[in-house]
Amino acid sequence: MDYTNLLRDSSGKLSRVGVIGATKGYGYTLLAQIPTVAHMVLRAVCSRHVEECRDVLLEIGYDEAKIVECRSAEEVRAAAEDAIIITPDYRLVMDCGITAMVECTGNTKVSSDAAMIALQKGINVYMVSKETDSVCGPILNQVARDNGAVYALVNGDQPRNLLDLYSWAQLLGLEVVCAGKSSEYDFVWDRDSGSFTYRDGAHESEDLPELAEFWHYQGRQTLAGRDRLLQKYREVISADLCEMNLVSNVTGLEPATAFLNYPIAKVSELADIFIPKEDGGILEQTGVVDVFYNLRETDEASFCGGEFIVVRCKNEKMWEILAGKGHVMSKNGKYCCIYHPYHFMGLETPGSILLGDLMGIGCHPECRQVTIMAGVADRDLPAGTELKVYGHHHQIDGLTPELLVRRSVGDAAPFYLLNGAVLQNEVKKGEPVTLRDVNLSGLSTYELFQKGLAL
């Protein structure tokens, strides 16, 4: 997309941004970028840790004289028009005269409530909390449409970046066989020393000269060999499945498998891997979402948790010309991989906000609960077990996530509605937690989920 018209916008519109849950990680990168962006100002920040929030704003370079702490609606009304309001109460953010609410707490209860308050007031919502969108995305898109507002996922996180790439392919009439992303951390091998490192920060390097045998891709047997050598590093990551859940709900693409395939692959191999089995790939069906582990040498650039699509090549001569340009093509010439090797977190997000605030772009009223992320017990869980979301990847101890097509879900409970739930029944290893096993009645997020199912 050409952003020149946004840069030259002469309408006088100004995006006044309120950010909820914003002192670390994603929120920090957004706060750091806003001051550099045309047609945008920071109006409000919500954090439970007000002093920490103030310190972050000062560290970034915001004007201390403009920072005002507000703990009531009266204090918000008394704040100057150009003040930057800090508040511990997310409900007050929507009274600050904002046009854009960015939600990045990761807390489904808070973020769904904040989104509903904002949308019903006609305030545009930019959802970073993928956990919330995985269960409430369909209904929030509808509420936005009904109130003349925008509800949008944000660039900087993989789901929106991948949706943009997918919609580009749709516009051009390309058939998308598979859409996906790399998992967050790379598998890196030093060809000279034989040393292997999984770049998650939790594992030490190990000598693995045997990887040389499976370095050059020779088909599915190569993937099987890599899997055997690197099995201890493989896992099903909650954040990955959740992100593909979001993409599936907008595009209609189904998961390649319930736990996704996670092949250990180099970028140059993707067009040979994410294709139908009859053509030498790993897919049982086409029109799917999937994830891979990026395998590279130490001197090769990372995929950075970026996004890809594999498309079918229908005009042989055209794709021969494009192959000559160096694009990633399958050996049989039938498929091409197109990719964006990045997601720049909050650095990219202002673009999504301006597209929504100035041009009304972002809503997906066609969003439906195509897939549901459930949780399978990885050990016997007794009645009385409390389920808690924790960690960088927002996992739940004792559960492995699986991404299920809605028609095959049965009564499996949505993964991110289980935070804080207590098991009423024993759940055996290998079984999903069902709606019979927990009591979600009275949970507002569950009610929104049910409304989304009814669409």
Image (spheres, rainbow, N blue to C red):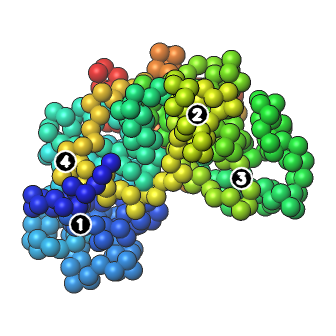
**Residue 423 seen from this side:** no
Question: What residue sits right under mark 3 in the picture?
Answer: 296
The residues tagged by marks 4 and 2 sit, at their Cα atoms, a distance apart of: 38 Å
Location of residue 257 in the rendering, given as x and y in whole percent from the top left corner = 61, 25
The residues tagged by marks 1 and 2 sit, at their Cα atoms, a distance apart of: 42 Å
The residues tagged by marks 2 and 3 sit, at their Cα atoms, a distance apart of: 26 Å
Question: What residue sits right under mark 1 in the picture?
Answer: 38
| 259 w.r.t. 104: above or below | above
Q: Nearer the viewer, mark 1 or mark 2?
A: 2
Pick whichever of labels 1 and 4 is earlier in the sequence: 1
> Please, what secondary structure does the residue beneath circle 1 have?
loop
Image side of residue 374 versus residue 155, left or right: right
The residues tagged by marks 3 and 1 sit, at their Cα atoms, a distance apart of: 38 Å
The residues tagged by marks 1 and 4 sit, at their Cα atoms, a distance apart of: 15 Å
Location of residue 436 in the rendering, given as x and y in whole percent from the top left corner = 50, 22
Labels 4 and 2 touching (C-beta < 8 A)? no
Pick whichever of labels 4 and 2 is earlier in the sequence: 2
> Please, what secondary structure does the residue beneath circle 4 have?
helix
Pick whichever of labels 3 and 1 is earlier in the sequence: 1
Q: Which mark is residue 359?
A: 4
